[in-house]
Each structure stands twice: as C-alpha cells, then as structure tokens.
Image (cartoon, grey):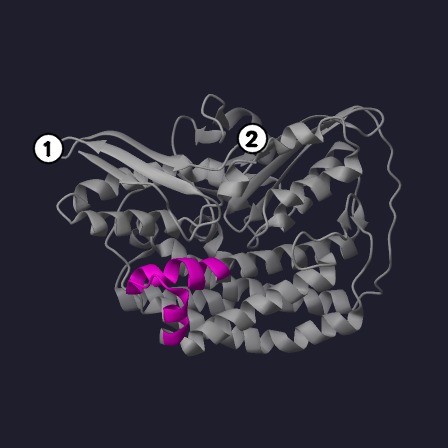
Amino acid sequence: MKIVVPHIHKIEGEAGFWAKVTRTGKIEELKFQTLLGLRQIEGILIGRRYFEVPIVVSRICGICPVPHILGACTAIENALNIKVSQQTLLLRKLLLAANIIHSHTLHLFFLSLPDFFDIENDLELLKKFKKESKAALRVRDLALEMAKVVGGRAVHPITPIVGGFTKVPEKEKLKGILEKIPQAIEDANFLIETFKKIEYPEFERETLFASVFSGKDYPFYLEKIVKIGNEKFTFSDFYSVQIEEDLKAPPVKRVKFRGKAYMLGAIARIKNNGEFLTKNSKEKLEEFLKERKINKEEYFKNIFHNLFSQSIEVLHFLEVCKELLKEILKMPLRKEKPEIKFYPSSGLSALEAPRGTLFHYYEIDKDGRILNCNIITPTAQFLHNIEEDLKTLLPKILKLKKEEQIRKIRSLIRIYDPCISCATH
C-alpha cells in the first residue's frame, strides 16, 4: 500500500510525503520530501566581500531573516576577532527575540491551530476565534514593529552589519514599543490559555533534543555550548565532529548526530533550559503539566507539545524584550564603526533561530573575501526526526480513511514548523 501526500500546505515552502507500507503494517519506505529547488546561496557568496554576506543570507527566508543576518555577522566577527559592544549585543538580542515572537505567533495561530478544529479556510478561523485572532495579530504586529525600529524594516532588516549597526534606533520609538509590551504580554497569556485547552493527540516517542546551553539563563544568542541529550559540546566541536551531513541527498543537507535523528526548536530549548524561563512562563508550563496530569518526561515524549512550547516562548521572549528595552533605554545610543583588519581566517557561529540552532561557517582571505562557507539550518537538522515520528504515527492510522490519514500526517509535519526555504538554501 502506498500513502502519498503530494502537497503539505500551511508550512513555509513546499513539501510532500510518501510511504510504502505492507499489508501487515510494516513500513518499507518513508520520505518527507522537500519540493523547492536548491538555490545555492553558499555558492553565490564565494568571492564576495564580507559586508555583502548578511544582506545575501537574509534572503534565504522571509520569515526568519534575522537569525541568518546575525549568524553571518557573528561568524565573520569570530573569524576576524571583532568584539562587539554591549549596545550591539543588546540590540541584536532584541531583534532576534522579536523574530522568534513573530515566527512563533504566525505558526501557532495561523498554520497549526486550524488542524485541531478541522478548519481549512483562514476566514473561518478568524470567525471562530475572533478575540484570539486579534490578540495574535497584535503580538505579531508588535514583533514586526520591533524589527522595523531596530533593523530598519520589518522583513529582511538592513541595519545589522559586521561589527554593529549602520543606524541605531530612535529612543522615542523604543519607548513607544516598551509602552505596548504590557498589552502584548496580556495577549500572550490569553493565547497560552487557548493552546492549553487543545486536545493534543496521544503520541509517545523518545528523542534527542539539541539547543545552545549556558546553565545560567535561557540562551539564544552568543553562546559557546550546545547541549544534546545529556551531553555538552563546544559549538565548534558539535559542528565539525559530532554531526554528519548527508551531501548525497540534495536539495537538503540532512544532518544526524552520531547516526541518530534529533529535534530542535521551542520544545528542545525548554527541555534543555526550561528552569531559566521567566517566572510567568514557567508557571504557565507547570499549570499545563498539572492540568494534564503528566510529568515533564511525558511532556517531552509528545512532539505535539512543540506547539504549546512555542506559546510559552512567546510569553517568555516578550518579557525578555521588556527587560532588554529597559536596559537599552538607559544607554547613550551612538553609531559605532569598529576597525576591521583582514587576514586569512575562518569563523563559526551558533544561535537559536525560531525553529532551532542555526550554524553559519565562513572562510575569509586576506582581502575580506569569502573563500568557503557552510550554513546548516534547523529544518535540515530535524528532517530525520520528522520521519522517525511519522514511522511511529503511521501504524496507528492505517485503518483510518485516506482523507483522515492525510490530515493526521499533515498535522504532525506542521507541528515541527519546518522552513523549506531555509532547508533548501
């Protein structure tokens, strides 16, 4: 028997799924297919000057351009031993946190929520969830406003550069955003209640979770350690030694850790760093566990809880933005132009994009031109994990009607929030 889903809609990009299953229920073959062609962004960068890189890589994705810009800037700074100022660090964190909020809100409400209520039409979703829709849009709009004020525009920001920013934000605009944060936090709490009520499918499979790690806070930018399972590695060791890229299966460089699939993103970050969530977001997670009568171990075995984890992170990162804004507003913001000296070198960065840990690697010559580069996206890393979860799901749905099988397959894939544009860069 063949199960074919030619198109997975409501994800970023284009993808499909197919599987061959015997009459006894044994899975012979199974594949989550990325249907976008290879764009060869890395090839485009070869021979270009260092300052062109952030602009080019931002075009990998329209939903998560910020992590690519900051990943490129940071990797090049690591290569050339450039130390950025506290001002730059805080503004970058604000920009990245805003992008996570924007991306999560889009996925939570407009891409995945309809699956739990059998809604195909977005207008029907807006009618059924009027208050929730307005709350989600307010949160997303504020995140985009932060991106515009700090990054110069809401999509594909242009102010972040190697060493700092071309233009610092106006304090009055930052104050205006800070004044809107309390309403956004109220909206985020309201949305958590919505996702708390959802009947998540019964699902259980143990997996490895990977994210950046510090052991002292909820890290997402400029950390040096990656935690996977119970092991910790420097991000350079994890990138160069511990993970293997499959270069024989274009257009995506699929990745495994010692031959094993692993998961990233919101649920992985909470698994590895959950004790450092803000007080309010941690309490919301504890309430969910208590109401569902499950422990943390059970929570992390169900991949569908990635959705609730994203709702927790929206609240967490809004509260992080609030504190960042307060700190930034105390500073005398000024334009910075660090001195850059070129020499043959290489640099790597690892940061948390909305969907998980993103790696950027660059080799640079004595004139500041790119000799070689490699970008490993979160989606490329968790594609194998999607397939492992589908192997667990399929035997449970074989007796269902074809339409229901397809609906459940699409629902599981969408829970991951895959970004096919990033994966096929």
Front-most of residues 150 and 20: 20
Front-most of residues 63 and 97: 63
Q: Horizontal placement of 8 versus 12: left or right?
A: left
Q: Which residue is drawn at 85% across and 30% down?
A: 342
Asked whether residue 251 is in view, the answer is yes
Q: What stretch is highlighted in magenta?
A: 106-127
Q: Position of residue 396 (x, y in %)?
A: 17, 45
Name the quadrant containing residue 319.
Answer: bottom right
Q: Position of residue 216 (x, y in %)?
A: 57, 52
Q: Which residue is drawn at 57% across and 52% down?
A: 63
Name the quadrant containing residue 74.
Answer: top right
Q: What element carries label 1?
A: loop
Q: Position of residue 314 (x, y in %)?
A: 51, 63
Q: If the image is split into quadrants, where does the N terminus sit? A: top left
Asked whether residue 229 is in view, the answer is no
Q: Mark 1 points at which residue?
A: 24
Mark on residue 239?
2
Q: Position of residue 67 (x, y in %)?
A: 62, 47
Q: What element carries label 2?
A: helix
Circles 1 and 2: CB atoms closer than 8 Å:
no
Q: Which of marks 1 and 2 is nearer the N terminus?
A: 1
Name the quadrant containing residue 351.
Answer: top right
